[in-house]
Image (cartoon, grey):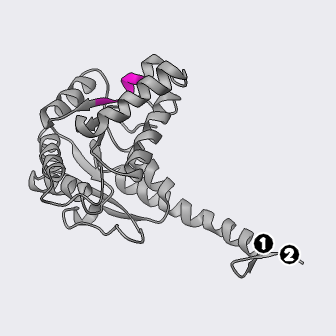
Amino acid sequence: MIPKQGGKTWNEIKTNDSWAIFKIMGEFVSGYEKLSQIGPCVSIFGSARTKPDMKYYKLTEEVAKKIVDHGYGIITGGGPGIMEAGNKGAHLAGGTSVGLNIELPFEQHDNPYIDNDKSLDFDYFFVRKVMFVKYSQGFVVMPGGFGTLDELFEAITLIQTHKIDKFPIILVGSEFWSGLVDWIKTTLLDTFKNISTPDMDLVQVVDTPEEVIEILDKFYEEYNLSPNF
């Protein structure tokens, strides 16, 4: 007798898994079609739990405005907190404001500052992360939780392993990020030799919108703007 899981037989589960391929394919096709038309953008990541009266919400809004003023659009995860602040800054500055939404049990709902024709919904985290990496000319990473760290380290890994070309990864808020960067250097690099010295150059830590713009402008004085793979 074939064992059951969640009331379904293994054969039923395998059949459902096979058909899920078409749903995954549909998310990729829809994402590629819409995002290929948006032009150069920078993705902003950070906590969904950051409130509008907190300093990093306000700083994110200012960063997004500056980025738009320098010719880029803004992509976020489409939800509240830092994501909302990024979309709000882009919206107030008259720039492209994209939201890549995903359904979550507690935190995620789309924010009102996304352009009506640039709000995309995803069921699969891995499809959504491909869209962030492929169509972003840089990552600006504000203080956040596990999701923020996941997106950050996936981008670092893809660049480190040469699966994609290098692009700027900017960590905003030295009081938040310095401990992590110090741990990477002292533990991963110096003590255990699990990374190489050049890997430390894959991220930069800053505190102001002006520093974010300086890094982006300096990088794209040398490299062309294009999708990342």
How far from the left and from the top, in percent, is residue 177? 30, 37
Q: Which mark is residue 141?
A: none
The answer to whether marks 2 and 1 mark residues whose Cβ atoms lie closer than 8 Å is yes
Q: Which quadrant is home to the N terminus?
A: bottom right
Q: Earlier in the sequence, mark 2 or mark 1?
A: 2
- Considering every residue shown, the one lying at the far right of the view is 1
**Residue stretch rendered in magenta on the structure:** 200-204
Q: Is residue 96 magenta?
A: no
Residue 204 lies, with reference to residue 42, above or below; the image says above
How far from the left and from the top, in percent, is residue 123? 47, 66
Q: Residue at x 41, y 68 (%)?
A: 104
How far from the left and from the top, in percent, is residue 39? 28, 45
Q: Is residue 215 left or right of residue 201?
A: left
Mark 2 lies on a secondary structure that is loop
Q: CA distance from mark 2 to mark 1?
A: 7 Å
Quadrant of residue 112 within the rendered picture: bottom left
Residue 68 appearing in the image: yes
State the residue position of label 1: 10
How far from the left and from the top, in percent, is residue 87? 20, 56
Q: Amino acid at mark 2?
A: Ile
Residue 58 lies, with reference to residue 176, above or below; the image says below
Closer-to-camera residue (161/33) = 161
Q: Residue at x 41, y 51 (%)?
A: 146
Q: Is residue 27 left or right of residue 40?
A: right
State the residue position of label 2: 2
Q: Amino acid at mark 1?
A: Trp
Quadrant of residue 176 within the rendered picture: top left
SS majority, magenta: helix
Disc 1: CA contacts within 10 A as few (<14), some (14-19) or many (>=20): some
Q: Residue at x 19, y 55 (%)?
A: 85
- Considering every residue shown, the one lying at the far bottom of the view is 7
